Image: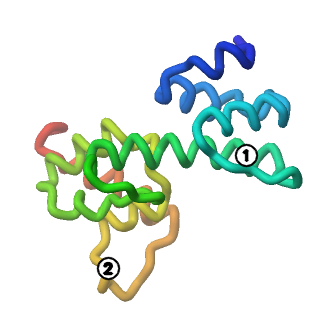
Amino acid sequence: MKFTIGELLNLDDEILYDYLSEKGKFHTKSDLREVAESRGIRWRSNDTNDYILNSILNKIATTKINNFLNPNDNFNYKNVHKVKEFSSEEKVRFVNKFGKYLDESDLKMLIYDETESSIPTYKELLTDVYLNLIKSPSNA
């Protein structure tokens, strides 16, 4: 199912995020520009469809995460440092609720100490996330 531009402009952020993550590439640059403008995202005439689409997705992800973690702050980036203070169980709940909005660097920050000298590969990161979720008390 493809939404019209009028429908896209009226979608809730979470539904819009899910939809654009899957089907955003099927919309015209004009549609994506209109959605970007409605969300307060600036674009340049030479921006690609992918760039505009990723800007929309990033803005929604940043807003969702920061409204939960930092409701009184106005960050222009995902500020997930507060999650490091969470217990393991709270981290699992956070990832279950907001995981789709997190990227690889966010996950690394949640799992690894910033002073750790070896930076894991993406495969190692996925393995660690999987093992941490298996060890979680809620999955026992």
The image's mark for residue 68 is none
Residue 7 left/right relative to 51: left
Q: Secondary structure at mark 2?
A: loop
Q: Amino acid at mark 1?
A: Ile
Residue under the image location 73 percent in, 32 percent down: 34
Quadrant for the N terminus in the image: top right
Quadrant for the C terminus in the image: top left
Mark 1 vs mark 2, CA separation in Å: 31 Å
Coloring scheme of the render?
A: rainbow
33 vs 23, nearest the viewer? 33
Determine which residue is flagged by label 1: 52
Disc 1: CA contacts within 10 A as few (<14), some (14-19) or many (>=20): many
- Residue 129 in the image: state x and y as whole percent: 35, 55
Residue 52 left/right relative to 137: right
111 vs 76, nearest the viewer? 76
Residue under the image location 22 percent in, 50 percent down: 91
Instruction: Report which quarter residue 79 is drawn in.
Output: bottom left
Residue under the image location 53 percent in, 46 percent down: 59
Q: Secondary structure at mark 1?
A: helix
The vertical placement of 84 against 114, above or below, is above
Determine which residue is flagged by label 2: 114
- Residue 103 in the image: state x and y as whole percent: 49, 54
**Mark 1 or mark 2, which has the lower sequence index?**
1
Disc 2: CA contacts within 10 A as few (<14), some (14-19) or many (>=20): few
